[in-house]
Image: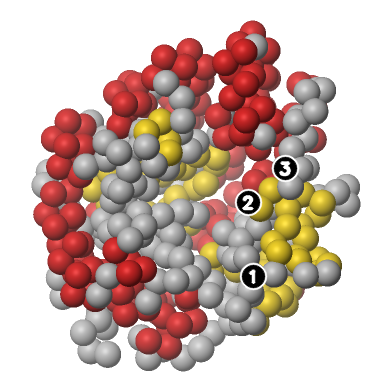
Amino acid sequence: MTSRERVLAALNHEEPDRIPVDLSGHRSSGISAILYPQLRSFLGLPPKPVRVYDLIQQLAIVDEDVLEIFGVDTVELGRGFALEEEDWSGWVLPDGTPCLVPAWFVPEREEERWVLRAKSGREIAIMPDGALYFEQTYYPFWDGEEDLNAIEAAFDDAMWTAVAGPPGPVSDWELKDGAQALRNRSDKAILGLFGGNLLETGQFLYRNDGFFLLLAGEPDRAHAFLDRLMEVHLFKLERYLSLVGDSIDIIVFGDDLGMQTGPQISPEMYREFFKPRHSLLWNRAKELAEVKVMLHCCGGVRPLLPDLIEAGLDAINPVQISCRGMDPAGLKADFGERLTFWGGGCDTHQMLPRGTPEQVKDHVREQVRVWEQGGGFVFQQVHNLLADVPPENVVAMYEAVTGGWGTVIGNR
């Protein structure tokens, strides 16, 4: 099987020739830019410039030699873009490591902190010295004076919607041609990151507490906001898939609906505000292109899974197994025939940063044993590999899942 065939078999609940593997196929399966050069060194690979494609989370582009070593079957659409030196600008990571960031969004240095500014010049995020990530500082609708006709303009002033990595600011024809070129040269399953966030966009614009108050206290106003947001999302979705629909295999939506202890909202609130709109978006995507729909959704969301499946979801990520209700055996037994679990292969909360390599291997083998039966599983650790993970534990994780078919693992 090719990598693409392997991933699609899993998504179709067929057992592939081996477990499909994801690393950096989307922005919640990546690796910290601080950890990445340590991993290359541990693998005995030559140093390469660290390219940070996600400034907020500070994730590194993973080079082809590492992807080959770990037998990775996925690639993000963004890897088909920003291929020239002029697309990148010099910066420095919090630990002092030199790196490159997209030239169209370079942080500014101020006293004891880094700042991200919108096109308007407004400060939208900061990273104080000693921190490892940027945090949002401006919420366009927090003052309660939202203009629903200006949602797209508000996106430019909210951190998560303003700070774009590759493809970045490209024209329609550049997006279409770049996507097709990536398709022609790669046999990996290609993930297109669309977003289409609903709950989270409300949180990005109103702030978390502000949007919760809106949902609970002013439902008519919340529906009006979500109706206008859906108009924007549907317009963008149709344009996006008209350009790249023939080049991608999976379209990735986002909405973190969960917390460590369970969903952020009740199933009843999900059904009222979000399920019909998710259904409209996800089924429209399937009408426009031959794609599978994946939702990036952190937290303990087991109570919402029946509704998410009914809304048209094919795969969920990152399967946060340390959260309440997210026991792999129970999830596989109850939902494994209807939902692909893209993740849950290794706990990133405690095991990867604190376990020994042998403990990591034992843990991964047990997760894989539960998840792999009958397909419906793509291996990925729970969310990104963070800066405090020992590189030897990363290697141990992949050694456990590959079972010896990695091309270089075990020879270093």
Badge 1: how crowded within 10 Å, few (<14), some, or many (20+)?
Answer: few
From mark 1 to mark 3, how far is it between C-alphas? 23 Å
Q: Badge 1 is on which residue?
A: 130
Q: Which circle marks residue 158 in the picture? A: 3
Sequence-first disc among 1 and 2:
1
Residue at point 27% right, 40% down?
326
Q: Are marks 1 and 2 in contact (CB under 8 Å)?
A: no
Asked which secondary structure carries label 1, the reply is loop
- For the question of whether residue 378 can be seen, the reply is yes
Q: Position of residue 310 (x, y in %)?
A: 33, 21
On residue 139, the disc is none
Under circle 3, the secondary element is loop
Above/below status of 330 relative to 190: above
Q: Quadrant of residue 328?
A: top left
Q: Nearer the viewer, mark 1 or mark 2?
A: 1
Using the image, determine if residue 163 lies above or below residue 222: below
Ranked by sequence position, the earlier of labels 1 and 3 is 1
Q: Nearer the viewer, residue 49 or 204?
A: 204
Q: Are marks 3 and 2 in contact (CB under 8 Å)?
A: no
Three-letter code for the amino acid on which mark 2 is drawn: Leu
Name the image quarter holding the N terminus.
bottom left
Tag 3: residue type?
Answer: Ala
Earlier sequence position, callout 3 versus callout 2:
3
Quadrant showing the C terminus:
bottom left
Quarter-of-image position of residue 239? top right
Residue 4, image x, y percentages: 32, 55
Left or right of 8 in this view: 245: right
